Amino acid sequence: MTAATSGRSHNGAYHILSASTVNSCPIGMYAGCVPIYRGSPNVLDIMPEPQAVILYGPGGNASTVQQLDALLADISADRSRYEAMLAWKHKPVRACCAGLDC
């Protein structure tokens, strides 16, 4: 997958977004996707919640393709885990962007 494209996870029930730029993350997130971001962990500073994004690479949630595949399989098998990643959508806007000037 490339930036700003989404796909379905292993069981076809959840939307995951591969984001190659920080600008790609919000677009997919508001569409109901969980972004996979490879880049600076500073991206967490602009995410509504740290668990709202999957960090891929050294120091992230998964540092290898195999770890990423296993993580996506785990998320696919656990609907409550996936929904927790989207819980920020049910909070007031100011609560989700404390680090930003909203």
Image (spheres, grey):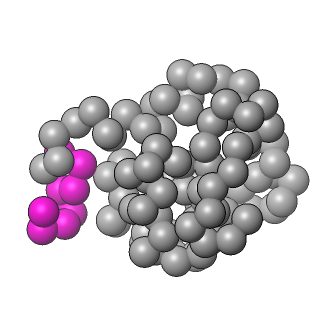
> What residue do we see at 46% from left, 31% from top?
84
Q: Give x and y (percent) for residue 96.
A: 24, 49
Residue drawn where x is 43% and y is 38% of the image: 86
What segment is highlighted magenta in the picture?
A: 95-102
Tell me if residue 92 comes above or below residue 31 in the rendering: above
Q: Kindly indicate the quadrant of the structure image that contains residue 87.
A: top left
52 left or right of 73 in image: left
Is 52 on the left-hand or right-hand side of 20?
left
Q: Position of residue 41 (x, y in %)?
A: 50, 69
Q: Position of residue 6 (x, y in %)?
A: 63, 55
Along the horizontal axis of the image, is 54 left or right of 63?
left
Tell me, yes or no, if residue 80 can be seen here.
Answer: yes
Place of residue 102 in the rendered image (x, y in percent of width and height, measured from the top left): 12, 63
Residue lying at the far right in this picture: please name it: 66
Image quarter (top left, top right, bottom left or bottom right) of the N terminus: bottom right
Indicate whether 97 appears above or below 12: below
Q: Indicate whether residue 99 is drawn in magenta.
A: yes
Q: For the stretch drawn in magenta, what is the main secondary structure?
A: loop
